[in-house]
Image (tube, rainbow, N blue to C red):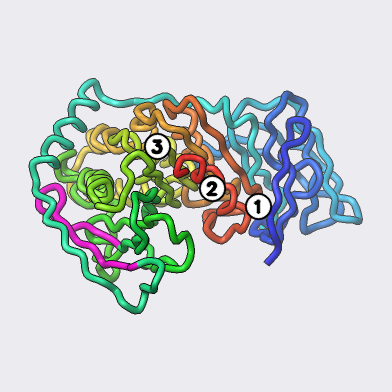
Amino acid sequence: MKRCILIILTGLVLASCGHKPTRAQAEGPAWLFTGKAPYILNTKVNLTGPAKLQLVTDLSLMAPEPEIVLEKDVEVGPDSLLNVDLGKLEPGFYEVRLSPDVRFNIGIRPDDVVSPPDSAPDFDAFWESTLAALREIPMDAELTVVPEQSNELRTTYRVTYTSLDGALAGGILCVPNAEGHHPVLLSYMGYGAPIYYFDPSSNPDRIDYMVSVRGQGIFREDQARWIDRGLSSRETFYYRGAFADAVRAIDFVAGLEKADPERITACGESQGGALTVAAAALDSRIKAIAPAVPFLGDYRDYYKIVWWPVHEVMDTADAEGLDREEVYGMLSYFDIKNLAPRVKCPAYMAFGLQDPTCPPHTNFAIYNNLGSREKHYWCVPTCGHAMWMEPSWPPIRDAFLDQYMK
């Protein structure tokens, strides 16, 4: 597998990567522009000769007639090189269309993408009452050793405990056998992701905890889906409990005899990225976070860009006879962009510019609303949603989080 390298240079993001899901290559001035106009698209594409270029706003992709902000005839050279002046563009993300097979996203000044919080006046009160209810529930944690995933350096456990409304949550815990108080890394899992075990020989001085929220991870139900459970009220919506489980995981690791509660960090991808942000928003014991391609950000705009998950949610709402506006109001309590201002710890976010599941706009609806004084982002222009398959991200993430675990 080729290593993916990203370089910031004169206001442009350059990339070289063996992963090309869009039938185009980000070579030379690439697809994420961070400087001022004019914006020159200079890239290789899988065609030659004359073509018609269309530039479509991402917030209109699900519309019957997408908004075309630029349309022009172009000539792709014999070397498949496309060079075109896009002129001035507003901050945001756009789909470049050259043919049915050659389509890819570009981004313009993502730090300036505006998607302000739309939380209700009682947003904070709702979450404070939810956390108060969680604190009243005894944890009753049970740890079971997993011998085949343990060695002389670290011991692995399967963990279960009680969370909000009496639901079962837990995960996979890997603890150093050495005495002392050790830093903790919480790894929040993606939507329906399979469980995994930590290598007990790696990071022998760190506590690793793979967090399973209710019904997922070690509790995963076959063919289950969670995004549209309990839509009738904010008290019954699935993610009220799941976000509480994310906080209960902090309660659990902070209480471990060998844990240093002053050195807890968190990371996760997709749903795991959302849970990472939610956990830091609801509990200040997390000292730094590294969410990748975070899920559940900006429901209303999400609906305009891709079908899943919000269209699925609204289809379920229709089937249950629920008013869509009321459902949107309920979802605002669980929108990660509304939780983001509560995050005060340092943050490093990764995103894929070609992500069809958690589109870049929804990532930056979260990132640009973070309350963190220190925050950074990492882009892989040719990556879709599978940031966990990109070799460039883990060393960046780990180096960032390691600063807060020393």
Q: Identify which amino acid the numbered label 1 is placed on.
A: Thr
Q: Is mark 1 on a helix, strand or loop?
A: loop
Is disc 3 in contact with disc 2, using a CB cutoff of under 8 Å? no
The image shows residue 226 at horizontal and vertical percentages of: 27, 55
Question: Where does the magenta region start and end?
Answer: 155-171
Q: How far apart are marks 3 and 1 (CA)?
A: 31 Å
Which label belongs to residue 196? none
Tell me if I can see residue 159 in this picture.
yes
Q: Distance between the residues labelled 1 and 2?
A: 19 Å
Of the residues under marks 3 and 1, which one precedes in the sequence?
3
Is disc 1 in contact with disc 2, using a CB cutoff of under 8 Å? no
Residue 387 position (above or below residue 108)? below
Residue at numbered disc 1: 382
The image shows residue 201 at horizontal and vertical percentages of: 46, 68
Q: Which quadrant of the structure image shows residue 92?
A: top right
Residue 136 position (above or below residue 207)? above
